[in-house]
Amino acid sequence: MLVALVCLQVQSSTLTKQPKTVDVVTYHQVLHSLPSGAPDPVAPDNFFMRETTHYHLLADSDWAQPDQNGTRNFLIPGKKFEGHEWYEETSKAPKALDSAFKYISEPYSRADFKKHKTSWGSSEDQTQPINKCSHCVAYECITTTDEVETHTLGKKRVTRIKHRDAWSLAMNLVGAGTYYDPIHSMCTGLSDARVDPPVYGY
């Protein structure tokens, strides 16, 4: 399934050039956290969701030569994409500990432990004119969501992780001469989330 996130923004960015890649990590629904908001790694029982989004610059209107009116033809190339799921656990939970898991159940099939394809598709080429007052960029995004649940019984500690990833396209419009920064313009509400410092690649 193709998901397009379109954010029309006018922002004053502190970036001096457009990043080619950005990696953003956020944590949601953390049951037991540190003062920073990150999950407590030594809590005997915990649950949290971690989203890791890798932004890769797919198209930039500044790459195109303007016509006599200053208009650029902004081309977003088509892409094939896939989504996956997989499961892991640090060890087998004994029956008394297994009952403590409320969010993540052990899969019925061992095949689910391996990364397997759950969705796929493709997008078509897209072209649109961008006037000289605007700067438009398109990022393809791979977002990996990890649901992590940990429980401890005596000396036995088990962590289960359910992974899934998905592809999306983020197209963003800013003013000419400015640059789009995904970390400052994320489309999802982050009021209850902790955001790690982003990692930029140029």
Image (cartoon, rainbow, N blue to C red):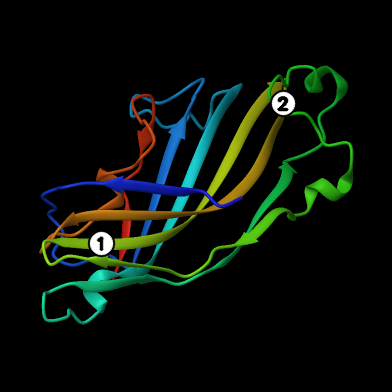
The answer to whether residue 46 is above or below residue 123 is: above
* Secondary structure state at the residue bearing disc 1: strand
* Identity of the residue furthest to the front in this view: 69
Tell me residue 65's x, y (percent): 21, 82
Which residue corresponds to the image point at 17% horizontal and 79% vertical from the top-left?
66
Left or right of 86: which side holds 172?
Answer: left
Left or right of 117: which side holds 58?
Answer: left
Residue type, numbered disc 2 = Lys
Question: Mark 2 highlights which residue?
Answer: 155
Tell me residue 147's x, y (percent): 61, 35
Question: Mark 1 highlights which residue?
Answer: 136
Tell me residue 158's x, y (percent): 71, 32
The answer to whether residue 145 is above or below residue 100 is: below
Residue type, numbered disc 1 = Cys
Tell me residue 48's x, y (percent): 54, 29
Which residue corresponds to the image point at 19% horizontal and 54% vertical from the top-left?
174
Left or right of 186: which side holds 167?
Answer: right
The answer to whether residue 152 is above or below residue 123 is: above
Question: Residue 106 falls in which quadrant of the image?
Answer: top right
Cα separation, mark 2 vs mark 1, equals 55 Å
